[in-house]
Amino acid sequence: MLNRPLFSRLDAVYVQRTQLDAESKRLVEVIWQRFRLAGANLPETQKYQLKALNQEAARLSTRFTNKLLAATKADGLENAWLLVLQNITQQPALQSLSDRETRTEKGDDNDTCELVLRLAQVRAEQARLLGFASYADWKLQDQMAKTPDAAFAFMRNIVPAARARAEREAAANSANYRSPTGQFHPTRLGLEFLCRTGAPCAIRSG
């Protein structure tokens, strides 16, 4: 997509896109945007910089994946997990791990912190070369939200409705799956395992 002659031909069609039918016009706009977001309209010197960054980002991503696989096999955790990851930023298990070395895993040959830090730097530089304030600004250009602010606003706005629906469903589940004595019966839902792990606490009436 960094081919200048090819992009020039595409650009010539793009500037006359109003003469096309609706479907063809949309197709040209999508393809033109992909080329632009890939850096097709950059000066040649910046293209070389972007190519180098693209290659480094690919190498870092591959190394990251390989380290995760190596760590899993080295610790005998293939097809199993000792600590379940809840999300990418907060791990509740860390609250109960008293051994600092267990929490930090300093000196681990398969530690990915430096790789992640460098990949973040590379992505930020890619976005800067392409004229965007951040990697998120760049990557959201062809998505529905378009901007990070719009994405955050969408998530914030959906919370009240999502919570209200979850509460309605929890209340309905609680009412539908109680015994005649009023006790919750997870076995009626086939939730024996969930019952043992305490998950039914999340399903209760008001």
Image (cartoon, rainbow, N blue to C red):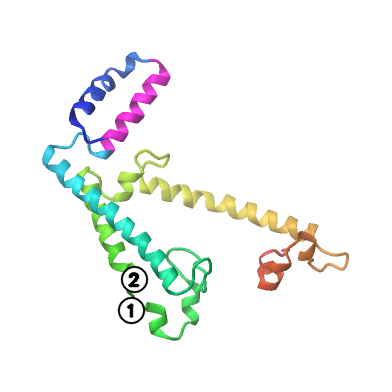
| Dominant SS in magenta | helix
Disc 1 marks a residue whose amino acid type is Lys
Residue furthest out toward the top:
19
Mark number, residue 111: 2
Give the left or right position of residue 182, taking residue 90 as reference: right
Q: Determine whether 43 is above or below 175 in the image.
A: above
Q: Secondary structure at mark 2?
A: loop
Q: Determine whether 86 is above or below 75 in the image.
A: above
Which of the image's four quarters has the C terminus? bottom right
- The x and y percentages for residue 74 are 42, 73
Q: Residues within 10 Å of mark 1 (few under 14, many from 20)?
A: few
Q: Identify the magenta region.
A: 21-37
Give the left or right position of residue 82, taking residue 39 as reference: right
In which image quadrant can residue 72 be found?
Answer: bottom left
Residue at 31 percent across and 68 percent down: it is 113
Q: Determine whether 161 is above or below 115 in the image.
A: above
Q: Which residue is mark 1?
A: 106
